[in-house]
Amino acid sequence: MSTYTIENQWVLVQVDEQAAEIHHFQSKENGLEYMWQGNPKYWSGRNPTLFPMVGKSKSGYLTIKGKPYQMGNHGFTRNSLFHCIHHDENTIAMVLEDSEDTLKQYPYHFRLVIDYILVAKKLVIHYSIENKNEEVMPFHFGLHPAFNCPLEKGKHQQDYHIELAQEELVNGVLTSKIDLDPVELRKTIILEKPSSRWSKLSDGKHFVKVFHDGYPWLAYWSPEAPFVCIEPWYSHTDFTENHLDYEEREGCIKIEPKGVWQCSYSIEID
């Protein structure tokens, strides 16, 4: 496995071939590390790509093409080894293709490419999923980036808040600011059909701003740990018991044979 670096005068970013996760997003101006580094005491993940499932089914099984399949929480991409297909001073491109192991969990041939593009203090992450089958390919998709919070020693998580681009209905209240209540974050705060183009995690001095325009669901989560996740989803985990087939679940995306589906989001720091 290898780790690849892109950088400019403001920031340094490192992406690892394991799960194509961002291992570092550091500011050269203030020396801060903005990405959660992973710690099994709380959560060993960092910023996994959720494909071909967001969350998991209540039963632990998914019915695909009439057959039961067992897939881990958030799909297999988070545990898969990618390969770098392009690397220059501003861009890293990683690819994952179906394998004998993935076909045991998900009976489709696919090609997933993730491009990391550094523009000043913003990292643009672009996803391209190709259907390599002679039939329609259904899948579920989401993102799970985790950010250090607090960012600085001497600070506490409660010193931070999440600012929204505009007012949203959060736990029944219309607001443009979410306080970091540890109980609510552990349960996961979920926004459905948000209008906001971005969410900003900030203490008023430093911030992480996630641009997520067009995603049907947003989740904010922290298991009473020194990080906060801002998660744009195209589909979602089972909120209640659900016996629908995989391709009929809410948020399922379907690509025509030999077609390509694309999306993106971005992270800005200061």
Image: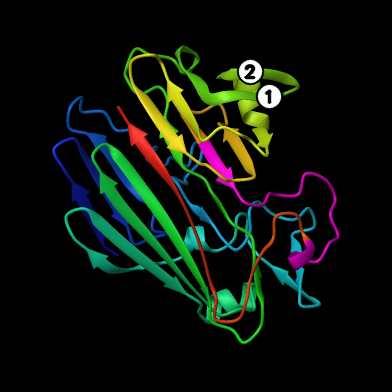
**In the displayed structure image, the side of residue 192 where residue 239 appears, left or right:** right
Tell me the quadrant of the picture where the C terminus can be found. top left
Using the image, determine if residue 209 lies above or below residue 155.
below
Q: Is 240 colored magenta in this rendering?
A: yes
**In the displayed structure image, the side of residue 215 where residue 159 appears, left or right:** left
Residue found at the very far left of the displayed protein: 9
Q: Is 84 colored magenta in this rendering?
A: no
Please name the residue shown 77% across and 59% down the image: 249
**In the displayed structure image, the side of residue 100 where residue 253 appears, left or right:** right
Highlighted magenta segment, given as a residue range? 230-248
Position of residue 129 measured from the top left corner of the image (x, y, whole percent) = 50, 68
- Label 1 amino acid? Val
Q: Secondary structure at mark 2?
A: strand
Per the image, the residue denoted by label 1 is 170
Task: Kindly report the distance in space between the C-alpha atoms of the residues bearing marks 2 and 1.
Answer: 7 Å
Residue 232: quarter of image: top right
Task: Tell us which disc is closer to us: 2 or 1.
Answer: 2
The tag on residue 117 is none
Q: Residues within 10 Å of mark 2 (few under 14, many from 20)?
A: some
The dominant secondary structure in magenta is loop
Q: Are marks 2 and 1 in contact (CB under 8 Å)?
A: yes
Using the image, determine if residue 4 lies above or below residue 173.
below
- Label 2 amino acid? Thr
Per the image, the residue denoted by label 2 is 175
Please name the residue shown 72% across and 23% down the image: 171
Position of residue 193 measured from the top left corner of the image (x, y, whole percent) = 67, 39
